[in-house]
Structure formats: structure tokens, C-alpha cells
Amino acid sequence: MIRNTERKIIKIQSAVMKQLIRLTLILWMANAIAPASAQVRDTASRKPDSTQIVRADSTKPLIAQQPAIHPYFRITDSLLRSNKYLQAKQPAQAMQESVRRTESRDAFFYILLLMLFMLGIFKLAYARYFHNLVRVFFNSSLRQSQLTDQLLQARLPSLLFNIFFACVAGYYLYQLLLYYKVLSVPDGILMIPICILAVLAIYLVKYLVLQFAGWLSGYRQQAQTYTFIVFLINKIIALALLPLVIIMSFSQPALVQVTVLVSFAVIGILLLMRFFRSYGLLHTSIKVSRFHFFLYIIGIELLPLMLIYKAAMLIIAKNA
């Protein structure tokens, strides 16, 4: 038992001695290596600092060779100064701006739609009167006395078609004022009912004058015949002008100019037809020459219209 204990103690002592010997050897080797490594030259710590070297600027010669202002800006500046329309050397001026005025033609559309609706209703309600009206117009001799009597007796259809003529003629007159730049669309839209009422007033006065002249002179039948011819031609003028005023309302100026010339030609031809047809019916009963009848047309019909037109132009120019 004692021997076993001694053996264990000897083993422990030998193991401790081995560890001490190993530790001593390691410390000795470390002490031997440290001085040798301290004497090695540290090349990394002694490299020269390349960032501190000031290099020559290679861009200076290039900058010195270039002009101070690019040629493009020199050319632009010279062009601006030499242009007399730009006047770059003159002081700046503020532009005078005005409010943009739009020309809405929506009212024209609704007025024309109303006139087309009127024509459709009148033609549908008085189809026989409308058919006889066209037949009598194309009968140059007016020998169809039965048709003429039917037209004379139809007072209400005649009145309605006369109102339709006043609407078309008044609107046509308004379009002429626009075409000749007497009015503008935004300012003169209220002139449409005024023109219509003016045409109504003119032909109402004319009708009353003719009836009074026939009663005063004793030629009541002849005055009634002449009145019938006048208003017959007026109704045909309304039918002829309706498609023309539609073109005048929404077309380009070049087409409007052609349409105005066509309308003048149509009205002139119809007025000549009225003159010759009236004279053909009245010269036998009244015994009047063509010259005197022509003077009557100028003095009683054309001259008052020209005076009314001149007065209207003066009033419009004064209120503009």
C-alpha cells in the first residue's frame, strides 16, 4: 500500500518537472528570437509618401490656349446685336396684352335650327298652300287664277310664311353686317332680333301703304295683285336664302365671299322677275309705261330701303 503511494508521488513529481522543463525551454527560445526580429528593417514604415509630391498641372497649357468666351456665344451675341427686329441693345419693354375674345357661333346653330323647324312645321301643316305657292311662282303668266285665288284666301298660311321670310331676311342682313365687319359676333348677337323686327316693320309699312294707295286711287284690285306678287317673291327669296345663310354662318371667309355673291345674284334675279311680272299684270289696267313703273320701283321701294340702311349704319357706328 505504501509502495503504491510512493509510486504515485514519484509520477506526479516527474510530470511536474517535465512541465517546468518545457516552460523553461519555451521562454528561452522566445527570448532568443525577439532581438533578431527587432533588428529587421521595417520597409513598410519607411516608404516615402507619394501624396506629398506636388505634380505639375498639365491642364494649364490647354486652358491658356483656349479663348475666354466660346466662339458659339460670340456668334450668338453678334447676331442678336445686329438683328434690327430684336433690338437687343434697346431697353426692355413690356408687351401690351389684351383679353382673348372668343367668337362662339352656338347661337347661329340654334337660330338656324329654329328656322328649319318653322319651315318644316309650316310645310307639313300647309302642304297644299306650299305646293300651290311653288306652282304659281313657276307659272310665268299667272293664268292659273284658281290657284292664285286659293293663295289669296289662305290668310293664315300667308302670314306665317311672311313671318318666316322676315326671320330669314333679318338673319341674312345680320350675316351681311358681319361679313362687311360692321358688327362682331360677341358684340352684335343681339342685332339678330333687331334686324328681323326691322324687316317686319319695313314690309308691314309697305303693305299698309299699298293698301292705302289702292283704296285712295280706286285701284284696289290692282294693289292687291301687286301686293300678292311682292309677297310671293319674298317667300321664294326666303326659301332660296335659307341654305345660303347656313353656309355663311359656319364656312371659311373664301366660301362666304362666294356665297354672298351668289345671294346677291339670286336676289337680283328674283327682283327682276317681280318687276317684269308685276308690269305684265298691271300695264293693261293702269296704262303705265315701263319707265314710269321703273321710277315707281326706285322711288317707292329701293330708295326707302337705302335710306333705312344708311340710318342703321350711322346708328351702329355711333354706338360702336
Image (cartoon, grey):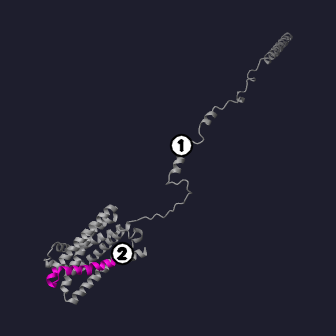
Q: Is residue 65 above or below residue 129?
A: above
Location of residue 298 in the rendering, given as x and y in whole percent from the top left corner: 25, 79
Can residue 247 be seen here?
yes
Which region shows up in magenta?
281-309
Can residue 154 be seen here?
no
Nearer the observer: mark 2 or 1; the answer is 1
Q: Residue at x 24, y 74 (%)?
A: 235
Q: Quadrant of the N terminus?
A: top right
Total marks drawn? 2
* Labelled disc at residue 193: 2
| Cβ–Cβ under 8 Å for marks 2 and 1 | no
Q: Is residue 20 above or below residue 217?
A: above
What is the secondary structure assignment of the residue under circle 1?
A: helix
Task: Specify the quadrant of the image occupied by residue 168.
Answer: bottom left
Callout 2, which amino acid?
A: Pro
Residue in the foreground of this view, choosing between 210 and 146:
210
Location of residue 21 in the rendering, given as x and y in whole percent from the top left corner: 83, 13
Residue 14 horizontal side relative to residue 275, left or right: right
Q: Quadrant of the C terminus?
A: bottom left
Q: Is residue 282 magenta?
A: yes
Task: Specify the quadrant of the image occupied by residue 318.
Answer: bottom left
Residue that carries the numbered disc 1 in the rendered image: 72
What is the secondary structure assignment of the residue under circle 2?
A: helix
Q: Is residue 185 magenta?
A: no
